[in-house]
Amino acid sequence: MNDIIARIDGAVRLAVQRLQTWFDPPLDAHTKPLEIREAIIEDIEQRVESVGAGRRVLPYNSVTVTVLAADKPARARLQAALAGMEESVTARLTEIRCAIPAGFVVDTRYVARPAATWAAGQRLAVDYQAREVPSVAATAPEDAARVEITVTRGQATQPSYSFGETHVRIGRSEQPIDGRGRPRANHVAFLEGGDAHSRTVGRAHASIRYDTTRREFRVFDDGSHNGTRVSRDGALHEVKPHDPVGVTLRSGDEIQLGTAALRVQIELRATRNP
């Protein structure tokens, strides 16, 4: 098993190394959108700096990703693969114990033609800036969102959880190692020695993210073996593994993780007009 994991991890690293040539020099036209997504996240992770005492920081709070999309089908594929990029980057920084910069944003843009400053054949550019952030009082969110999660089947560290708009990771054990050998902190953690339902939950099973543009929570399957589904009004909605789009959540939905289950209640505060 360790040999299989090592081979998979090595393949991912090789793919990322190939993708680094997209920045300088450019890569060929056969790179898959999901590989592009991982390369962008890896590029941002490489900018993280150690400041001592186990602390890490990213010296930039504004990341602009510009991707070449020659036509509408190409753009649609890239948009699907790169959806939720800011939430994914934030999750990766959290996993490696890097402080999230104040006012952190990841802006993804698509262009039909390469910029004049790009190298021949270049398709992707990632630019970093350190923006001045207004005071916290001036930027307090007026449309804060919360999700309440109740364990309805299985055993977890708590019977219920409450989160603000964030990236909520769900799995078995509080701090397992994921399929790539990286530590992962689960916010909703089923017990390692729990009942039969709990044992069907993968260590890195699923996650819930808040989409600030659509103002909605979405659930994603992080590559589980036993699957993730959303039960709503008697219908089951399958959450495809590693699907960058995920499934929208509504209040009262049940998230099924293997045979374990969670009930979600969502609170969205209306935006106040100036």
Image (cartoon, helix red, strand yellow):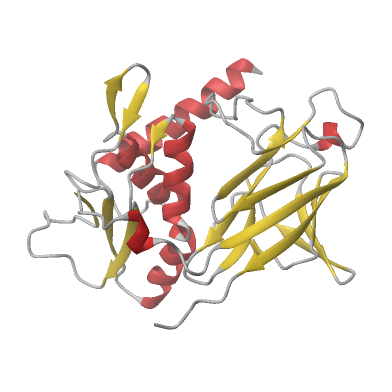
Tell me if residue 246 can be seen: no
Residue 1 visible, this angle: yes
Q: Examine the rendered structure and indicate whether residue 242 appears above or below residue 253.
A: above
Would residue 40 appear left or right of 92 to someone viewing this image? left
The residue lying at 36 percent from left, 59 percent from top is: 137
Where residue 118 sits, quadrant-wise, is bottom left
Q: Is 164 rendered above or below residue 233?
A: above
Q: Position of residue 91 (x, y in %)?
A: 48, 42
203 sits to left or right of 145: right
Instruction: Indicate the position of residue 57 as horizontal and vertical percent values.
Output: 31, 33
Which is more toward the observer, 233 or 25?
A: 233
- Residue at 30% from the left image edge and 68% from the top image edge: 110
Which quarter of the rendered picture does the C terminus lie within?
bottom left
* Front residue of this view, candidates 176 and 159: 159
Is 265 rendered above or below residue 28? below
- Measured from the top left, where is residue 164 in percent x and y? 58, 54
Instruction: Name the outermost residue toward the left.
Output: 117
Residue 203 position by quadrant = top right
The structure residue drawn at horizontal position 75% and vertical position 67%, both measured from the top left corner, is 251
Please state, as top left, top right, bottom left or bottom right, where the N terminus lies in the image.
top right
Residue in view at x 11 percent, y 54 percent? 119
Q: Is 43 displayed left or right of 159 in the figure?
A: left
Residue extending furthest bottom?
Answer: 273
Total numbered circles: 0
